[in-house]
Amino acid sequence: MDVAKLTRFVDRCWAEEVVPRLVEYIRIPNKSPAFDPDWAAHGHMEAAVTLFAGWAREKIAEVPGAQLDIVRLPGRTPVILIDLPATGGRKGDCVLLYGHLDKQPEMTGWSAGKGPWVPVIEGDKLYGRGGADDGYALFGALTAILALREQAVPHARAVVLIEACEESGSTDLPHYVEHLAGRIGSPSLVICLDSGCGDYERLWLTTSLRGMCGGTLTIRVLEEGVHSGDASGIVPSSFRILRRLLSRLEDEATGAILPSELHVQVPPERIAQARTAAAALGPAVHSKFPFAGATTPMTDDLVELVLNRTWRPQLAVTGIDGLPVPQNAGNVLLPEVSAKLSLRLPPTLDGERATAFVQQLLERDPPYGAEIRFHAREGATGWNAPALAPWLERSLARASEAAFAAPPAYMGEGGSIPFMAMLGEKFPQAQFVVTGVLGPHSNAHGPNEFLHIPTGRRVTTVIALVLADHARA
């Protein structure tokens, strides 16, 4: 294959077609069902599906045997399924390429002139919600396949699957995987374009993903609020009980999760990769975060920071209810307080068992007999990548050099992609390439989220090269 010609094709497609479509996509507030229960009535998800499918249909119109379907199961978000036949090589094989098009909610704190539904291009960055997480995936995957066809380079049958429920835990996806099992087949290679990158200088391959235990912890001590001068010292503070319960789970001095039931033994090869990644990134392991004032990381040991983020459980309180804003807060003892908890789990820990354990831990022996309830979401198990086949390891090394002029790097990610654990179980013999464009300061889920456009182009080139090598493997 002519790599220079491949690169020109990819760059031209991104400049003339992908970026303009992503600008349109960012304007659509297609929040995931967990954040927009009335998504079907609002029509934003349908608008995003129509945009994606319309572009894809144009691109595959002249590909013999190619099919695109918008698949809809009753009461569930739709999926886009694109099936492109093989062009030589492994005729009986297939590759599954995955992404999603639903988005996280708005979040506050966007810079002046920017917003979640306001696409802004500044230099190499396209700002707005969803461009990097994960709107670019369909465009990148299909562009890579079409780039091979432009040079008549063989590839296996390719199935592109784009879901619309990932940010809600992919609750609809298992039903579609089962429904479409006959059409998907048994892929020998799975490519996921919904992950992160340590920097924008090289290809980053994700080796693991953490699981998730989430839910809302509610403490109720009174039927109604009462004067704090009258009741304090007699009625226990609902907020103090919240602090006490969280201390069952987390050491407030260090942030370490206390129960051994929520830890696993970190595999030696992942520790070695963490050392390599920490050496490559240096202070960027933590400097990419917008620390306020003199705030420092939890430790100075860069390797420990990488392992904390990828293989150790960590707790975040992401929401509080029952506490009035300070300007409206009277001298009242609060009857009830609720905290939304997000507990990241080690990749190999069973998510459902961990969630059941956390619920029992928080609800047992309620202090002062207070009403305690942990409304748990379904636990999600993480994912630990299988060992790379020799052909794939060589292919990724060559592709990274060709696209980034640097060798690839390997590191776990702290987030969750529920689809990966599901596919790992369903296709135990498959190889996995999990990568993405969410690098330093790209701020997925937060304010000023952006897509680094050159990285999107380079990742697209990598995928094309890997698909070509897969056909020859």
Image: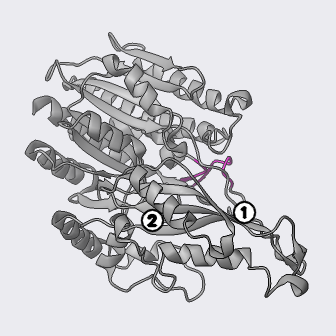
What residue lies at 37% left-to-right and 28% top-to-bottom?
160
Question: Of residues 400 and 435, which is closer to you in this image?
Answer: 435
- Determine which of the numbered discs, if any, sits on residue 72 in the image: none
Q: Vertically, is 187 above or below 305?
A: above
- Magenta-highlighted stretch: main secondary structure? loop
329 sits left or right of 162 in the view: right
Q: To which quarter of the image does residue 471 belong?
A: top left
Assign a secondary structure to mark 2. Answer: loop
What residue lies at 47% left-to-right and 17% top-to-bottom?
69
What residue lies at 87% left-to-right and 66% top-to-bottom?
224
- Determine which of the numbered discs, if any, sits on residue 440 in the image: 2
Query: Which image quadrant: the C terminus?
Result: top left
Instruction: Give percent across and percent down for residue 13.
Output: 42, 35
Whether residue 257 appears in magenta in the rendering, the answer is: no
Question: Of residues 82 and 234, which is closer to you in this image?
Answer: 234
From the image, tell me which residue sits under label 1: 112
What residue lies at 72% left-to-right and 58% top-to-bottom?
113
Q: Which residues are magenta?
A: 115-129
Q: Residue furthest top?
A: 65
Instruction: Give percent across and percent down for residue 127.
Output: 59, 53
Q: Amino acid at mark 2?
A: Pro
Instruction: Give percent across and percent down for residue 418.
Output: 41, 44
Q: Vertically, is 48 above or below 410?
A: above
Q: Nearer the viewer, mark 1 or mark 2?
A: 2
Please tell me which of labels 1 and 2 falls first in the chain: 1
